[in-house]
Amino acid sequence: MDKVIVSASGQNLEAEVAPRFGRTPYFLLVNPETMEYEAVANRQNLQAVQGAGIQSAALVARYKPSALLTGYCGPKAYQTLLAAGIPVFLGVAGSVREVVEQFRSGKLSISLSPNAASHW
């Protein structure tokens, strides 16, 4: 199975899912079968004045994940992710490990629309 990307507040599987996609401190690339992971810092977008969601979506797209798991995502970032062919799962909460296990067991549903308002 391909890797999934999770917005995370820290650099390991016990970190909580970061609720804000565009301004997440880290993205964790996780193999749902083996739970092997890699942390990618999102420093350049964390403090962006504007465009953090689109820039974060572009960063995620470079890794070509099979899915993105996050709390909230605005319309521009959501459209950027869809254009890159990345299924988006919104409204997830808990530890990265917990949400990846939920994903693997089919307990999460693909989101059909963004769940945060545009800020600009």
Image (cartoon, rainbow, N blue to C red):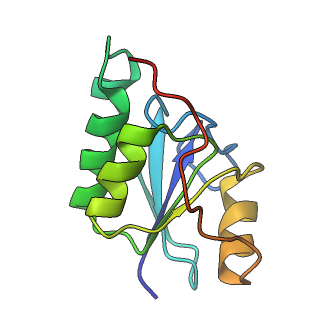
Among the 4 quarters of the image, the one containing residue 62: bottom left
The reply to whether residue 41 is visible in this rendering is no
In the picture provided, is 100 more to the left or to the right than 40? right
Residue 86, position as x, y percentages in the image: 38, 67
The reply to whether residue 27 is visible in this rendering is yes
Q: How many marks?
A: 0
Residue 9, position as x, y percentages in the image: 59, 36
In the picture provided, is 97 more to the left or to the right than 47? right
Residue 31, position as x, y percentages in the image: 50, 76
| Figure check: 54 above or below 119 | below
* Residue shown at the point (65%, 68%) measured from the top left: 100
> Is residue 79 or residue 4 the one in the foreground?
79
In the picture provided, is 35 more to the left or to the right than 14? left
> Is residue 41 or residue 112 the one in the foreground?
112
* Residue shown at the point (38%, 17%) measured from the top left: 120
* Residue shown at the point (63%, 56%) measured from the top left: 13
| Figure check: 87 above or below 50 | below
Among the 4 quarters of the image, the one containing residue 113: bottom right
In the picture provided, is 104 more to the left or to the right than 49? right
Residue 5, position as x, y percentages in the image: 46, 60
> Is residue 40 or residue 93 the one in the foreground?
93
**Extreme top residue here?**
49
| Figure check: 47 above or below 20 | above
